[in-house]
Each structure stands twice: as C-alpha cells, then as structure tokens.
Amino acid sequence: MNTLEQRSIDFIPPDERHGSPRSLLFVWFAANTSITAVVTGALFVVLGNTALWSIPAIVLGNIAGGFFTSLHSAQGPRLGVPQMIQSRAQFGYLGAILPLVLALMIFLGFYATGLVLGGQALANLLHISRHLGAVLFAVVSTVLAIYGYRYIHRFSHLAAVLSGVVFVGLFVRIGFDSHTGAAFSHHEFAAAPFVLGVSLSASWQLTFGPYIADYSRYLPETTPKSATIGWTFLGSVLGGSLAMVLGALVAAIGGAAFLSDQVGYLADLGGALSALVLLAVICGKLTGDTLSAYGGYMSVVTIVTSITGQKVIRPKHRAIYVTLISAAALAIALAATNSFLTSFTNFLLFLLYFMTPWSAINLVDFYWVRREQYRIQDLFDPHGSYGRINKAAFTAYLIGVAIQIPFMNSSLYVGPIADWLGGAEVAWVLGLLVAGGLYYVLSAAVRREHLPVAELPAEPASAAAN
C-alpha cells in the first residue's frame, strides 16, 4: 500500500473506498477543540455578553451553523470528489473559480491564525521563540497534509481524545476557581451582543463548509446519510461548544491576563499539568492547520485545473502545492500584529457574509435540485453538461451577498438596519435563505430534467496517474 495518498481532486472509485463514518466524530471534534475556537469563545465576553449568557449563545450558534455544514458531509460518499469540485455543478466549470478563491482565503486565514496560536503553544512548551514555534508548526502541518487523508484521520483520533481529557480537566479547574462565582453573578441580558454571539459561533461552523466533504469522500457510497451527517454534526457542535464555552469562561475570569496571552493563561490554569495542556493545544491546532493546508491545496489545484484542463494531480505535485500554501500562511503569521482578536473577528464575519450564500446554493442543488444525481465526469469537462458559467447560480449568489449589506455588523462596516437593531447580527440568516431560495426558483428547468444515475468515470483514466 502506498504511504502517501495517491488521489487528489479525482474521483475515488468503489474499490478504494474505506473507513467508518464514526471517524468523522474525531476529525471534527479535534478540529473544533482548538485554541482558535477558545479565542473565539472569549470574543463573546469581549463583545459585551456575560459569562452566563455566553453559554446559550455559543450552543445555539454552533447548533445552527453545524446543522448546515454537516449536511455537506453526505456529499462525500455519494459523489466521491472533494467539496469544492462539486461547485462546478452549480457555478459552472470556470464559474466555480469565484467560490474557490473565497475558500482559499478561508484556508489561508485560518491556517495563519492557527500558526500564531500554535506557535505560542510550541514556544511555551519548548522554550523557544514564537516565530520559531510557528515555523515548526507549519512544517509538521505540511508533512501531515502531504501524507493525506488516511493519516489526517488517524492523527485526529489522538488529538480528539487528548483535547477531550484536557478540556474536562480545565472545566473542573474553573469550577474550583474563586472567581467563577463572581463571573456568574452577573445576569444582565443584552440582546444585540447575544445575537452577535450566536452569529459568531454559527460563522465558525459555516466556514468549515468548503471542506467538509473532503474528509468523507473515501467512505463507501452506501454509507447512510444519517450516519455521515450525524457523526459530523456531533463532533463539530460538541467540540465547538466546549471550546468556546471554555474561552468565554476564562475571558470572564482572567480578563486582560487571558486576552494578552491566551495560550500561556490556559497552560497556567492547568497547573502541574500545564505541559499536557500545551500538548493538547498543539495537537488540536495541528489538526485544524493540517485541514487548512490540505483544503488550501484542493482549492488551488481546482483553480489551476480549471484553466489547464487537468483531471489528476500527482502526489509529488501535491507536495509542492501544500508547501506553497504553508509558506504563504507562515508569511502572514509572522507578520501578524498585536490586534489579533479584532482582526480575527472581522475575518470570521467576512467569511460569514460571503460563504453562507455559497453553502446554501451548494446544498439546495444537492438535495432539492439535482437530488444527489450528478454526472461525475462532467465535473472535469469544460464542455460538459454543467457549462462554463451558470448565470442562475451567480445571480442567486450575488443577491444573497447584497441582501446582507444593510444587516452587516463589523468594525469595517455597520449596515443601517444592524445599527437600528443595536448591533444585532442577522445577515447570515438572510444570506442562506435568499441565496438558497432564489437558486431553487431559478433552477426550475434543471429540476424538471430526469437525470440519469451518476455516471462514474472509467477507472483506467483515473488509475493512470498512479
């Protein structure tokens, strides 16, 4: 058996399918129980919520966002191709480049912010500089991403178990902290920060959408949708909620001490087990950064192959692409300023505005327009049935983005309706409903077609790359 993953953006044939959907629980729990999610949870308190009211906002947002992103997971076994390749069925062979560029920005942004925090953890553990820590973090993430799908799943099992044990320990430690009672003594409810917090945690979940199916595409096609969706939902929502609640609590208790050094504060909170806390932070963040490196590679090669017409990328070329993605993310991380929390908030909200319409269109197309029936080979053919550019998808997408503008609330721009609502953030809900609904209406002709069962590409063409 080859050590490195041999497939890339090409279709996974039935005889290469393997694994259990339960593995998705570990992948998405590990990806969500990261220091980045903890920092996101701290933003709930920074934005004006009390520790008490942060908890329901976190849980509600993770459930809402996790519901939509987990629906993408069923696309992997059914179609056997990466998530963003599927966008060619909605936006067209060339039109899919737009959401691919946006997805690439997601991967680079999360990768870079992960290197900042992961570098801090390595620096504290090994007593080296934060910049050297970020470099080492990037190297390990790159190696894992190059080895690919099977090793990413294996590593996530270790990271998930370690993070789960450490997070439970930290919650116990917080329960005995003398400041915890004071943090929960504040019961004031503020509607606008609460709604903004729900949107922030929902945006965290929704930004996983562009690569959810990448990690289920090797599962057998007969895998029940309920299992794929259920395990993904459970891992994402449980992991995200635990990490963000922890972040909100330590922000309420630690205040400026936590906000100035998130990793160091968590390590100190662990007391005698500080090294284990740092190791959990490192493993959890390595999972997220590896997914970002792997997803960034998928986006880049999908863009490149849209122009060159290639259908397969060889493993040695994947190594080059992954290394370039890591180098770009590392450059961003090393140039990061101290205004990290503010920049990260803006980044999350930016992703929310532009990626939720894409997610809505992709899901509506899969479940209600084409009803899971696709011509797989046409996803790789610029002259295939999906065309070069789908005007219906672009119309729905652009209107889905535009409808959000009056409702936007970020430090870059506050829409008039968001201002009237006192800063409450509901733009993402409109982006989902309007883009998805409009795409469904504009795709009436496609819905009337009686599509054949998905035709699979000839195996010799796929195997030739190996």
Image: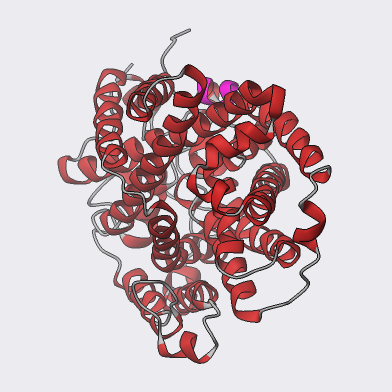
Residue for point 54% across, 77% down? 426
Q: Which residue is drawn at 39% across and 64% down?
A: 350
Tell me which colouring the rendered structure shows.
secondary structure
x%, y% of residue 89?
A: 38, 56
Q: Is residue 159 magenta?
A: no
Q: Within the image, what quadrant is residue 274 found in?
A: top right
Residue closest to the eye, 234 or 361: 234
* Nearest to the observer: residue 267 or residue 143: 267
Measured from the top left, where is residue 46 in percent x and y?
A: 56, 63
Left/right of residue 147 with respect to residue 45 in the rendered view: left
| Residue 155 belongs to magenta span | yes
In the picture shown, does residue 447 fall above or below 21? below
Does residue 105 appear in this view? yes
Q: Where is residue 51 in the image (x, y as percent from the top left)?
A: 71, 61
For the point 73% across and 37% down, the residue is: 170
Magenta extent:
151-156
Please say if 133 is above or below 247: above
369 relative to 139 in the view: left or right: right
- Observer-nearest of 354 and 128: 128
Q: Which residue lies furthest to the left in this view?
A: 308
- Total numbered badges shown on the rendered structure: 0
- The image shows residue 431 at horizontal and vertical percentages of 47, 74
**Dominant secondary structure of the magenta stretch?**
helix
Q: Residue furthest top?
A: 1
Taking 286 as reference, is 382 above or below it?
Answer: below
